[in-house]
Image (tube, grey):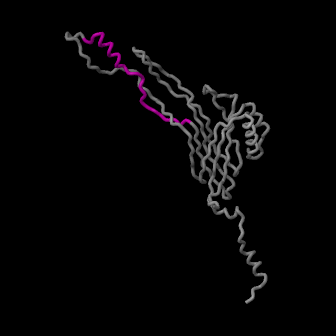
Amino acid sequence: MKLPATLPLLVGLACPCVLSAEESDAHLPRQVQVQVEFVELDHKDLTKLLFLSALEVADATPLRKTVAEMVKKGEANVLETMMVVARSGEKATSESIREFVYPTEYEPPDIPDEVNVPGEPDGKGVSPEELKWMGMLRTQFTPTAFETRNLGGTLEVEPGLSDDGRIVDLKFSPEIVWHTGNTVWAEDKDAHGNVSKVQMPQMYSLRVNTAITCIDGQYNLVAVLSPKDQDGVTDFTRKVMMFVKCDVVVVKETGK
């Protein structure tokens, strides 16, 4: 039987066989790559940037490009970059840390309640020489409890993807922690010149805990923080801009 001449055309219209790359990837799983950047610059330069870059939409990509030129010229410095990949609705953490253990409770100097020392035969008690040696039994400040603090950078994220995979609702908590020194709260010196101290560490943190909405591939300016100076004190002449970018990536096997 001879087929109608129009049948191939009708079949082609009813059963399209060529799909675009976006359509062919629509059924594939996706994950989110979250990138956080800390850029340090002069306070005056930051104020100028914010004044000249008033945002009408949540896209700080042009501002990030301007900051990149400043870094290239030596007018700004990239302090830290963190990145972690997560699936939608699940938490992920990235850490570059040193575990710093420090005492939080101390026992004060003390002498034992009971000491067996041979007395004089006539019952006169302990001799002056023996009392001198008893002083050596006196303890110093003794740590009895400890805590651990992570020094370095930590990034915790929890992204949520929209149905079309273009919008990311992001909860995240980036943090950088430094140990800047110790504070002495008490000091003791025994008869032999041995010194013991009650001291607690000083920490400086750059920390943000927030939730934002991102567009795939766009930068967002999330926060502006004040860094520390060389003495570990807040330096208000400098500022740290914190950018975040979410990239939605398709999980698929590439051609070999």
Relative to the observer, which residue lies in front, 157 or 28? Answer: 28
Q: Give how far across and how far down residue 172 sits, in percent.
A: 61, 45
Residue drawn at 27 percent across, 12 percent down: 126
Check the image and report above or below for 53 versus 123.
below
Residue drawn at 46 percent across, 22 percent down: 197
Q: Is residue 143 magenta?
A: yes
Residue that protrudes farthest toward the front in the picture: 256
Q: Does the magenta stretch include residue 124?
A: no
Magenta-colored span: 125-151
Q: In which quarter of the image is residue 206?
A: top right
Residue drawn at 55 percent across, 35 percent down: 151
Check the image and report above or below for 255 versus 176.
below
Horizontal side of residue 67 vs 252, given as left or right: right
Horizontal side of residue 89 vs 58, given as left or right: left
Q: Give how far across and how far down residue 246 sits, in percent.
A: 66, 49
**Which quadrant is the N terminus positioned in?**
bottom right
Relative to the observer, which residue lies in front, 70 or 178? Answer: 70
**Which quadrant is the C terminus positioned in?**
bottom right
